[in-house]
Amino acid sequence: VARIASMYRDVHFHSLEHAYHVTISANQLINMILTADVGNRENAGWHPSPNSNMTRKKLKAIKHFSSYGISSDPISHFTVVFAALVHDVDHRGITNHQLVKEGHPLAIRFNDQSVAEQNSVAEAYEILTEPEFFDLKCAICETPEESKYFRKLLISLIMATDIASPDRVQLGKSKWKEAFSNAKVVGDAIDMRVEQMTRNDTENNKVVGEVLGGTTTVEGGRVTKQERRWSNCSTSTTTSAVTGRRDSLSSAVSGRRGSLSSITGRRDSLCSTTSEMPLRSFEDHDNSSSSDQLSQENHNKENDQQERRHSACSSSRQELRLGIKQTLTLHGSTIEFYPHDEHDKLKASAVLDQIIQAADVAHTMQSFEVFKKWNERLYRELFVAFQLGRGQNASPNWFAGQISFFDGYIIPLATRLKQCCVFGDLGETFLNCAMENKRRWLLEGKDFSEMIKRIVLEDWKKNYQQEEGKMIDVEFVVRRSMKEEASAT
């Protein structure tokens, strides 16, 4: 933790304190998933006997399937927390778009794609592979398969935080649509396999039915301890908590190790229907002599054959749809990354993406005071970049831009956190907080925006203005900054 902390730069938003905030938020989200599992069972009126073998089996099954396997996957718990800690390592306070525009060495190294995120992954994983951290890496991953899974998930999670990339955003939308397009609003989280496992036990079947079909509410409209803890999550007390207890980051893994099944591709032969589809010929209506010779019976038979061929072709095309779940090899066979019987892995991957994204912008779904704090810091970072000639001017559209950000990203994200059902009743907390912050911003945001613009401008003049009353040579600052970064790289 100390080594990672030393690699964060002294910028206003993407700083070490931001990493602390995201890390604590991510860990809290994981704990909410584990708590939601227990809460759903207790609220359903099920008080199992600890000595019952069937009860333990059913308990494990419900806990596993209600979170698509996340609750019983300790490596994913640690990876989410670790990704949150390192996701902005070595961030320059400059957007990816600007780094690409400048032809920055990092942009060249990472081919203009998610530059800051790829740099953070590379820096963090390189540190983890150093000899002094060998024991830590072995504690995280006991087998080569677990190591491969950890690295793959770490890359996927940090790449998901690049919400400014249209390609990344579209990939996330496609993954979510593929995973949850057929999901039910309530009860989809608990798979029917749980009921199948206990179908011979009448009493247990009754309990499963209650869990599958029932919903729970917060009694009397009171805010639960988990909701209060999430809403008030701030880094004012986070710094001391993290630096004083560095081993707390492993709490998501400690005592919860489990076996990990690796994702393997299944190759299926490619079904070709092209040869089975003859091209339809459209004869000129003027030459009707040949068509008149066909009987009505033969004409109908030919139409039926064409319809069957068209139907078979459509079915095959749908089965061979390429994208998130399967792709083609060079010799024409398919590789399935998420076979039908492993669809929960795709759902788990989509949910974990939502978790890291929510943690990264957790301030928008917490208390309004927390939101204002980080809103000002983000504005300061963008303002400094603009003054140095390394970014666009965010000042004119700051108030309206936050409303668009709530409508276009935050509220849909909070809605997905609710729809995936892994948080139980706590899933509504995120959406309620996001809607409340948007409401408060509509009322107070314009005055707050004008205030921070004035304060930031005064601070800039006081800290960066020369005695002659002229601003620092912007071109010199940019040249010097890029030279230093190139040398460090």
Image (spheres, rainbow, N blue to C red):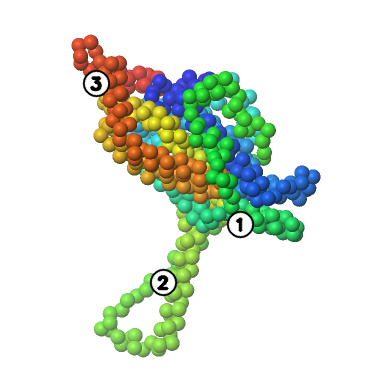
Mark 2 — residue? 278
- Above or below 195: residue 413: above
Mark 2 residue type: Pro
In this view of the protein, which residue sits in the foreground, 434 or 290? 434
Q: Residues within 10 Å of mark 1 (few under 14, many from 20)?
A: few
Mark 1 residue type: Gly
Do residues under tags 1 and 3 come within 8 Å of each other at their CB atoms? no
In this view of the protein, which residue sits in the foreground, 73 or 486? 73
Work out whether residue 272 can be spotted. no
Which label was assigned to residue 213? 1
Q: CA distance from mark 1 to mark 2?
A: 50 Å
Q: CA distance from mark 3 to mark 2?
A: 66 Å
Q: Identify the secondary structure beneath mark 1.
A: helix
> Residue sitting at 40 percent across and 89 percent down?
295
- In the picture, measured across the screen, residue 435 lies left or right of residue 270, that is left
> Residue sitting at 41 percent across and 39 percent down?
437
Mark 3 — residue? 475
The percent position of residue 311, horizontal first and vertical second, equals 46, 70
Q: Residues within 10 Å of mark 3 (few under 14, many from 20)?
A: few
The percent position of residue 382, horizontal first and vertical second, equals 32, 29
Residue at the far right: name it.
51
Q: Identify the secondary structure beneath mark 3.
A: helix
Work out whether residue 292 can be spotted. yes
Residue at the far front: name it.
220
The percent position of residue 142, horizontal first and vertical second, equals 65, 33
Indicate which label's residue lies in the foreground, 1 or 2.
Answer: 1
Dot 1 or dot 2, earlier in sequence:
1
Quarter location, residue 226: top right
Dot 3 or dot 2, earlier in sequence:
2
Dot 1 or dot 3, earlier in sequence:
1
Q: CA distance from mark 1 to mark 3?
A: 65 Å
